[in-house]
Amino acid sequence: MTKAMFGAGCFWGIEERFRTVPGVTDVAVGYSGGTTDTPSYEQVCSGMTGHAEVVEVDYDDRQVSYDELLAVFWDCHDPTTLNRQGPDVGTQYRSAIFTYDEGQAEAARASKAAADASGHFGAPIVTEVTPAGPFWRAEEYHQQYIAKRRGRFGGMFR
């Protein structure tokens, strides 16, 4: 299995989206890009740790390419809003691609440049592309949050 890591606002929705991609074998929500070891959700939300809410995607690169995952990433959030996605504001909600090797870094930079040049988003893309640091798995109640609560929200997350 190969790994990819993305930050695109609140991790609940992007986890759900990546789970639908054929070839993706697992998705975990967590935190990365900060300075505190084993941060809690409350610490990350304080904005003091520097972490982003992220998803770590395990995928079979014989079934889905990194470029295809990048396309899902661009499609599932607004990469033009700095430290914000919808009503969620703070550095933990920043748009970020954390890369595990130079091949991913090159692909991410090229994909970002192409998305920016397309004019599709109507504003400059502010997504950071940086080497992946430690991934800190979020508390269990955050894992598959939407799937666990789908019936409780009156169909809100279908």
Image (cartoon, rainbow, N blue to C red):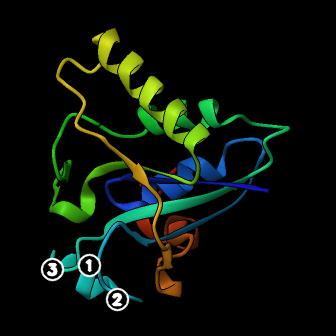
The quadrant in which residue 66 appears is top right
Left/right of residue 119 with respect to residue 59 in the rendered view: left
The residue that label 1 is drawn on is 44
The quadrant in which residue 77 appears is top left
- In depth, the one of 50 and 83 nearer the eye is 50
Q: Which residue occupies the extreme top position in the image?
A: 118
Task: Give amino acid for label 1.
Answer: Val
The residue that label 3 is drawn on is 48
Task: Give amino acid for label 2.
Answer: Ser
Q: Which mark is residue 40?
A: 2
- Distance in Å between CA atoms under marks 3 and 1: 7 Å
Q: Nearer the viewer, mark 3 or mark 1?
A: 3
- In depth, the one of 61 and 85 nearer the eye is 61
Instruction: Give coordinates of residue 83: x percent, y percent.
Output: 17, 53
* Image: 24 above or below 40: above
Instruction: Give coordinates of residue 94: x percent, y percent.
Output: 25, 53
Give the residue at x 25% y 65%: 92
Residue 84 in view of the camera: yes
* Image: 113 above or below 60: above
- Distance in Å between CA atoms under marks 3 and 2: 11 Å
Q: Which residue occupies the extreme right position in the image?
A: 62
Task: Give amino acid for label 3.
Answer: Met
Give the residue at x 25% y 30%: 125
Left/right of residue 13 with respect to residue 67 in the rendered view: left
| Label 2 element class | loop
| Label 1 element class | helix
* Image: 25 above or below 146: above
